[in-house]
Image (spheres, rainbow, N blue to C red):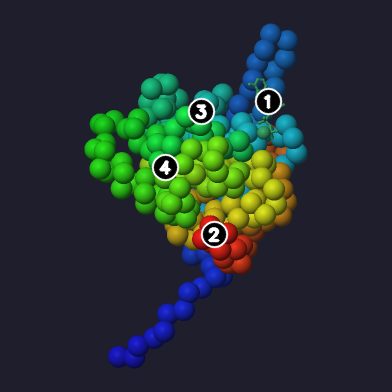
Amino acid sequence: MTHENVTPMTSIKAEAPQKVIIEMKSLTKVFSTESIETHALRGVNLAIYNQDYISISGPSGCGKSTLLSLLGLLDTPTSGQYFIDGQDVSNLSINDRAEIRNQHIGFVFQAFNLIDELSVFDNVALPLRYREPAMLEKDIKKEVLTSLEKVAMSHRCDHKPNQLSGGQQQRIAIARGLVGKPTILLVDEPTGNLDSKNGDAVMAMLAKLNSEGMTICMVTHDPRYADMAKRKLHLLDGLIADEYGTGEYSVDALALEKLSAQEAK
Ligand SMILES: Nc1ncnc2c1ncn2[C@@H]1O[C@H](COP(=O)(O)OP(=O)(O)O)[C@@H](O)[C@H]1O
Ligand SMILES: [Mg+2]
């Protein structure tokens, strides 16, 4: 047998999509007030595959946030069906929704939404502390450290969020999103509160996580960042207007290197 040299690849070709993990069928959302009905989503059909990296872009008011909150089980559809891992989650009670959300969904928000009074460790541990049945502290510790390593932030465990830069805070938020091993990571304008250097680093981090197997769905205004996803959806007036993407993308190895160099200081 010959011994082959395995060289690390920076360009990742997507494998043929395998398993549908999330499916929306004719999903609508109508917001009704006394005087006006707003049709925020008008019949969205969407299948998300294991290890997908999807970006959703479109003009203000087209329904991006509504779609993300339905995906994340923060709200219920007016009509249509929604499945996660084959389970119909369209019409769950509030308690069941919370449990499925805790098991299947990781969130990353524009404003990080970290708790300033808690250490980095405790911020990341938060989703696990809501698990039923309760997790052992040593298991929580293991998962938190693994998650912080994935975003190269384990050396900041004992810091408070406000002692960190915006880019670092967003990476802590990503670690919190990953810690429960979710089916999908939902990301809402992750770079909206960051300068371009930190924004690029966070995007490089997301691409790396996807290359390691994480399924990601991201909403972004920024066309340059939308283009970094494998599948690019355009939302218009509450409908998916079109989708483009070759299924190929490359991890910005340079941005990641710069990031590590910065961290090492
Ligand atoms: N809670 C709500 N009550 C009433 N209307 C809403 C509510 N949330 C969103 N909308 C309306 O639904 C439409 C889509 O909003 P949204 O999903 O926030 O769009 P985007 O995130 O693309 O800017 C908009 O017309 C918005 O005003
Ligand atoms: Mg929005």
List the residue tagged with mark 2: 265
Q: Quadrant of the N terminus?
A: bottom left
Provide the secondary structure element on which disc 2 rests.
loop
What SS does tag 3 mark? loop
Label 3–label 1 contact, CB within 8 A: no
In the foreground, 189 or 162: 162
Q: Mark 3 sits on what residue?
A: 74
Q: Position of residue 226 (x, y in %)?
A: 67, 51
Which callout, 3 or 1, points to the residue nearer the camera?
3
First in sequence, mark 1 or 4: give its number. 1
Residue labelled with disc 1: 39
Label 3 vs 4, first from the N-terminus: 3
SS class of the residue under badge 4?
Answer: loop
Residue at numbered disc 4 = 158
* Residue occupying image coordinates x 37% and y 26%: 96
The spot of residue 85 in percent (x, y) is 40, 43
240 w.r.t. 201: above or below: above
Estimate the spatial distance between the alpha carbons at disc 2 and disc 1, rounded to whole Å: 51 Å
Callout 4: 10 Å neighbours few (<14), some, many (20+)?
few
Residue at the far front in the pictured view: 265
| In the depicted structure, whether residue 101 falls above or below residue 52 | above
What amino acid type is highlighted by mark number 2?
Lys
Q: What is the distance, in whole Å, between disc 4 and disc 2 at their CAs? A: 18 Å
